Image: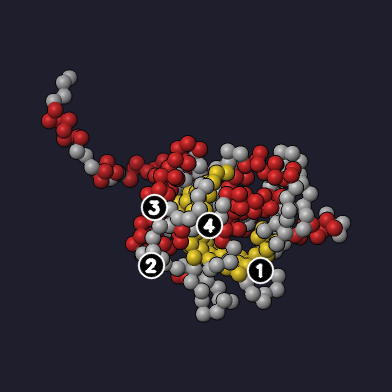
Amino acid sequence: MDIDKDTLLKYSKITDAQRKVRDSGYFVGEVMDRFLNGTNMAGIKLPFHVFDDLFRLRAQELTVLAGINGAGKSMIAGQMMISAMEQGYKCLSISLEMSPASQMARMIRQCSLQKNPEQDAVLSYAAWSHEKMFFYDQHGSVDSKTLQSIIRYAVDVHGVDFVLVDSLMTMSMASDDWNGQKDVVCSLANLARNLDIHCCLVTHARKGNSIKDRLDKWSVAGSADITNRADNVIIMGRLYEMDGADAYLSLAKARHFDGAEMDIDLKFDMGSLNYYMSGTMPQQTGMDVIGKAEPTDGIHGNLNMAGLT
């Protein structure tokens, strides 16, 4: 049967709106998977087991990780990427504030529990993280269009699942450019959805009336669209003059998870640069390739010296 040009022309002008307006039956399979197979809890677990049955860093979603300077945002982001790799996900770090070598050195400390990692620990981490951990090697700043291209490339060529952008302040825009900030956040949220990945954007928070005040999602500095557009908001803060805790992590927004929003107090192990909850201890990760490296310094090192491990 011949099809004339006029007939084809009508279909060539179908818009995205026409293509994407769908009957509810189109989504039944996905909804059934969510209720019967628990696919709503698929995704990356946070490094703290209290969230295991409550929350995930899921594909197609954006998380904002905020805190004031020195709150530990980059360190907790390193733990999140290590946790993701341990669960079989591939990570990309786009940090324009720290060099890849500096980031990797810190992550090796977090994995090996050694303040000054030995050669075996470095080689073990390198072998374990090969084709799992990728870095964008540039200092300074980057514009939104380039950022999107980097992420698309990493997903297409390396199969990346989790992207860390550290931080919003390193984007090529003025600090009071609210529309520019909105564009970056919206572009990351759209990329996460379209590429089936999870994006995590590090940003700063405004200080409260006192440095001891706990922060919430309203404390995130910049445009209100940052937290409005994000699926999840995680706040890192320091605790001062509090026995038994050095910091807190607040899951201040979890749009798709009932009952997941909560604050947890954390201890900080200076030797390994790990945060951990009371009743637990930092654990070695990725040290099985050449053999486990002996923990030094920090809480594990002190226990070893005392003969308690």
Q: Would residue 7 be found to the left or right of residue 23 on screen?
A: left
Q: Secondary structure at mark 3?
A: helix
Q: Position of residue 42 (x, y in %)?
A: 52, 46
* Mark toward the start of the polypeptide (1 vs 4): 4
* Mark toward the start of the polypeptide (1 vs 3): 3
Circle 2/circle 3 CB separation < 8 Å: no
Query: Can you tell which of label 1 and label 3 is closer to the viewer?
Result: 3
Query: Can you tell which of label 1 and label 2 is closer to the viewer?
Result: 2
Q: Would residue 12 be found to the left or right of residue 275 on screen?
A: left
Q: Position of residue 76 (x, y in %)?
A: 59, 58
Q: Which mark is residue 71?
A: none
Instruction: Estimate how packed mark 3 is, as few (under 14), some (14 to 19) or many (20 or more) residues with alpha carbons within 10 Å.
Output: some
Circle 4/circle 2 CB separation < 8 Å: no
The residue beneath circle 4 is 97
Q: What residue is drawn where x is 81% and y is 60%?
A: 302
Q: Secondary structure at mark 4?
A: loop
Disc 3 marks which amino acid?
Answer: Ser
Q: Nearer the viewer, residue 18 or 202?
A: 202
Cα–Cα span, label 4 and label 2: 20 Å
Residue 66 seen in the current view = yes
Instruction: Estimate how packed mark 1 is, as few (under 14), some (14 to 19) or many (20 or more) residues with alpha carbons within 10 Å.
Output: some
Q: Secondary structure at mark 2?
A: loop
